[in-house]
Image (spheres, coloured by chain):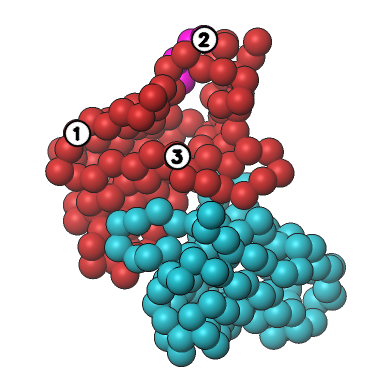
Chain colours: A cyan, B red
Amino acid sequence: EAAVTQSPRNKVTVTGGNVTLSCRQTNSHNYMYWYRQDTGHGLRLIHYSYGAGNLQIGDVPDGYKATRTTQEDFFLLLELASPSQTSLYFCASSDGGNTEVFFGKGTRLTVV
Amino acid sequence: GEKVEQHESTLSVREGDSAVINCTYTDTASSYFPWYKQEAGKSLHFVIDIRSNVDRKQSQRLIVLLDKKAKRFSLHITATQPEDSAIYFCAATHNNAGAKLTFGGGTRLTVRP
């Protein structure tokens, strides 16, 4: 069973705070993704990567950095968190191309 | 870039009836159209997909139709059951999109007993 593990599962931070969301996949997939889910917007792609050291910009990258340290690990960084970044964040992985994407269980981030 | 619109934000059907969720896309180069299901409080998982070389695909009670001319695709769930209640997301991508899926806004399907 393909596995994508996110941590933490829940996080509360203050405006201006520094947050790192972690994701590890054990699928041996090349591609990893960070999405945010907001009511009415579906899932929107923040950043993605096709291998260690690679980073691609998604559709809503402002205010986010990401880093892919290994094939397994992909991190999302919010260096100056704002209330507009309160959301449910999903990490995912895939083999790329037109193949199934496997999602983690999500991280609920609240910025107060 | 690609935009995917999901026309029904909510849908309610009676158990045993069919449910239809419609999506449109804008990029004529899109060639792969998956659907994902999100049950309450859970993550998303893949349910079915269709590629642009066919216009219909069926997997048990799920049917996907693709109309490339209209840039429209739809998910049909036949003989609905309570466990079909969930949020369904359509998505689109193409070979040159770098494996970047664009999702619709989601449809919350409720199957009433």
Query: Where is residue B29 shown, x and y percent of the image?
Result: 19, 56
Residue B55 is labelled as 1
Residue name at image x 65 percent, y 81 percent: A77
Residue name at image x 53 percent, y 54 percent: A1
Residue contact at pointers 3 and 2, CB within 8 angstroms: no
**Label 3: chain letter:** B
Query: Where is residue A26 shown, x and y percent of the image?
Result: 54, 69
| Number of residues whose C-alpha sits closer than 10 Å to that of mark 1, classed few (under 14), some (14–19) or many (20 or more) | few
| Residue A28 is inside the magenta segment | no
- The amino acid marked with disc number 1 is Asp
Image quadrant where residue B18 sits:
top left
Q: Which residue is mark 2?
A: B16
* Residue stretch in magenta: B16-20
| Number of residues whose C-alpha sits closer than 10 Å to that of mark 3, classed few (under 14), some (14–19) or many (20 or more) | some
Q: Secondary structure at mark 2?
A: loop
Foreground label between 3 and 1: 3
Residue B47 is labelled as 3
